[in-house]
């Protein structure tokens, strides 16, 4: 998937002094683990210190907004990671929409950047590709790590 990803970044962003929170759901744990690891690798590559990263889990994606609120006061930026896979019911549509709206609301309320790491996939294979678990896949977690550092630095520079 050569077109996937956050594109050419305008400059270097240094995460040395940043505190980053990651809150992730536990549903679809294989994909979640790859995404969290992708984010962690990128955060460290950009200078974020391991002791400045807080990781919390919540049962499922529906709980992500509450998880974000738990971390918001302790860090400069939060990455919310969940994987919703469409089943045979309307549940997927309801949760996807509700969680997306709520995460946007929480972001406004906390006045800090929130990185949207909610994958809404039609199939298991699609989820695996977006976590870099297939030969032609791309790990979106890595992009979310980069987006977290970029946005936290930008907000610090333009409070
Ligand atoms: C119930 C449910 C279902 C069916 N599917 C998923 C899913 O694909 N991904 C996910 O993160 N969570 C799922 N959940 C769990 C809900 O998000 C939530 O944790 C429970 O309904 C409890 O509130």
Image: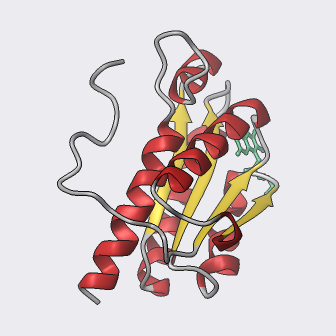
Q: Nearer the viewer, residue 99 or 79?
A: 79
Which residue occupies 48% across, 38% down?
140
Image quadrant occupied by the N terminus = top left
Image height check: is 83 above or below 155?
A: above
> Which of 18 and 86 lies nearest the eye of the viewer?
18
- x and y, in percent, of residue 75 in the image: 58, 80
Give whichever of 102, 89 is nearer the camera.
Answer: 102
Residue that appears at 50% across and 50% down? 45
Q: What is the x, y in percent for residue 9?
A: 23, 49
- Which residue is situated farthest in the top direction here? 135
Q: Position of residue 125 (x, y in %)?
A: 60, 16
Q: Which of the 4 quarters of the picture holds residue 92?
A: top right
- The residue sitting at 21% across, 57% down in the picture is 11
153 with respect to 10 (left or right)? right
Give the percent coordinates (x, y) of residue 150: 34, 63
Position of residue 76 relative to residue 130, above or below, is: below
**Viewed as shown, does residue 32 lie left or right of 75?**
right
Residue 65 in view in this figure: yes
> How many labels sit on residues?
0
Q: Please tell me whether residue 20 is drawn above or below residue 110 in the rendered image.
A: above
Q: Quadrant of residue 55?
A: bottom right
Among the 4 quarters of the image, the one containing residue 29: top right
């Amino acid at each position: 998937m050569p077109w996937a990803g956050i594109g050419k970044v305008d400059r270097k962003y240094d995460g040395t002094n940043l505190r980053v929170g990651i809150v992730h759901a536990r549903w679809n744990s294989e994909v979640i683990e790859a995404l969290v690891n992708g984010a962690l690798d990128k955060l460290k590559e950009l200078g974020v210190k391991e002791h400045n990263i807080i990781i919390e889990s919540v049962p499922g994606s529906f709980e992500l907004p509450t998880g974000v609120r738990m971390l918001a006061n302790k860090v400069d930026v939060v990455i919310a990671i969940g994987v919703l896979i469409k089943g045979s019911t309307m549940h997927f549509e309801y949760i996807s929409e509700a969680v997306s709206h709520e995460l946007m609301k929480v972001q406004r309320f906390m006045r800090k950047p929130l990185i949207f790491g909610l994958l809404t996939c039609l199939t298991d294979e699609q989820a695996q590709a977006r976590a870099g678990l297939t030969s032609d896949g791309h790990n979106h977690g890595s992009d979310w790590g980069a987006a977290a550092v970029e946005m936290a630095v930008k907000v610090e520079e333009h409070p």
